[in-house]
Amino acid sequence: MPDKIILFVEVLLLLIFLRISLSIKGFNHLISISKNHKIKFTYNSNLKRNIKAIRLAAHIIPKCTCLLQSIALKMLVPVNNDVSLVVGISKNKIFASHAWIE
């Protein structure tokens, strides 16, 4: 149980940091952070647990978009796992976008 709490706190702080970074520095800086981070997270071996922690924390943080959640998951996954951040954009009558991990 303590490991789940530690993971949740780490994810919550990460998402807050990413949200503030996006607001202040913008999209390009956020992508740079996700590519160049050197942070070692305490608990990052259980993918389902990471996703659940991100989803729970995202409900607490205002405007915690799929982009922020995807970047957080990319940062939590160990470097040796081959994951990619994908951002899709639709330019139909209304601008829409979505981000996910592959």
Image: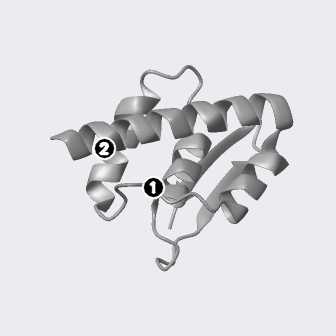
Query: What residue is shown at x 65% (from left), y 32% (from top)?
Result: 19
Secondary structure type for disc 1: loop
Work out whether 28 lies above or below 63.
below
The residue pinned by badge 1 equals 41
Query: What residue is shown at x 46% (from left), y 33% (from top)?
Result: 12
Question: Disc 1 residue type?
Answer: Phe
Question: Would residue 14 be visible to someone looking at this image?
Answer: yes
Question: Disc 2 residue type?
Answer: Lys
Hey, which residue is sitting farthest left in the picture?
Answer: 1
Camera-side mark, 2 or 1 = 1
* 6 and 26: which is toward the camera: 6
Left or right position of 42 against 98: left
Q: Which mark is residue 52?
A: 2
Left or right position of 47 against 101: left
Query: What residue is shown at x 15% (from left), y 41% (from top)?
Result: 1
Left or right position of 76 against 63: left
